[in-house]
Image (cartoon, rainbow, N blue to C red):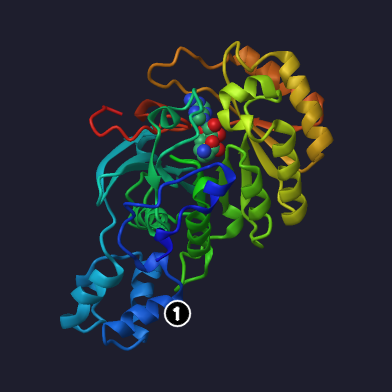
Amino acid sequence: MPYDRPDEHTALGVSGPGRGMPPRHLADLEADQRRAVVRELGEPAFRADQLARHYFTRLSTDPAAMTDLPAARREALAAALLPELATPVRHLSCDGGATRKTLWRAADGALSESVLMRYPDRATVCVSSQAGCGMACPFCATGQGGLTRNLSTAEIVEQVRAAAAAMRAGELSGGAGRLSHVVFMGMGEPLANYQRVLAAIRRITHRAPDGLGLSQRSVTVSTVGLVPAIRRLATEGLQVTLAVSLHTPDDELRDTLVPVNRRWKVAEVLDASRHYANTTGRRVSIEYALIRDVNDQPWRAELLGRLLRERLGALVHVNLIPLNPTPGSTWDASPPSVQEEFVARLRTAGVVCTIRDTRGREIAAACGQLAALPHSAG
Ligand code: SAH
């Protein structure tokens, strides 16, 4: 079983629990593995393909709707390959129903959140890769709660399937639509759960009926900057967008804002990002939460601009995110005039840069606010 192995990044100084993982699910398996499971149940192998079509194409997990399977065998097949992994504990909506956060409770009680956001031209789901997070960034609510465990491949895919089903069913305002984008910007550090996240990306982007058929280019993986994992991601032959949570160009401050910087410094992170950009031809996104009087000084904008031009040239785009408030933190977003000044200096340095239109602040669904608190109002 893949879950018995310790996470491979333990060796890289980033540990992740492997115990307490959920039951095997169709979305954990390759097509031939699914067929083997079905054969073990004494069923013809093509039943596995039928189940995959229900799951990945019809986005259904309800055995009663699988009328092309013999009625007497539906429950057994579903039990073997479609165990219920998590139940939605609560949905919270805002933006007139165009943004919806879902709190999930896994079979072992682990909590995670996903956020579905509809825009005029696309619909994006922000998914969690871990229950909690071990990276301990002090401005992020998830980081304050610590790591519960890695999510399984199927637990990640299931967040995307559920979002695609919700879009198809018209559960967000604006009527029925299609899920187009996936961002690994929910709870957790995706590259600390590397193998499961990679398998999830393959399932999400594989064409139907073996996957959900989203385009690789509409998937974004966001990381604190686990350098060996970024370099490894560059070897996978994928076209996914890499986002790097930099937050400051200098090691001294980054050592405290993103504690993993004590292990992999800014220069190493940017070199690995450059390698990813060169290998894939994809522009890398740099995430930068603007925190009032902490990392928003003009000199930092200039240093950032210079570093990015030097190390990444035109292969970079900066996303500035005015800090979202988190419980217990005294930090604030930079005021608009400071944001504008920061943008202007980056642009003068020749770096493409936008201020992110953050969604979901009032339901604690915005970047850095996912705490998976079952009893809070939002
Ligand atoms: N662990 C990964 C994935 C999480 S993505 C990563 O850090 O990249 C969530 C993004 O929101 C990251 O860029 C994170 O640094 C940022 N973020 C965290 N807390 C925030 C806050 N309070 N306000 C704005 N952005 C925040």
Which residue appears farthest toward the left when viewing the image? Answer: 72
- The residue that appears at 81% across and 31% down in the rendered structure is 350
Tell which of 167 and 182 is nearer to you.
Answer: 182
- Asked which quadrant contains residue 305, the reply is top right
- Return the x and y of residue 237 as percentages of the image width and height: 66, 62
Amino acid carrying label 1: it is Asp
Q: Is residue 31 above or below residue 301?
A: below
Q: Position of residue 75 (x, y in %)?
A: 19, 74
Task: Please tell me whether mark 1 sits on a helix, a strand or a loop.
Answer: helix
Vertical side of 175 occupied by 4: above or below: below
**Placement of the C terminus among the 4 image quadrants:** top left
Q: Residue at x 28, y 65 (%)?
A: 61
217 and 2: which is toward the camera: 2
**Residue 357 in sight from this viewpoint:** no
Residue at the extreme front: 11
Residue 364, quarter of picture: top left
Q: Which residue is mark 1?
A: 32
Disc 1 Cβ-to-ligand 1 distance below 8 Å: no
Residue ID at (66%, 40%): 285
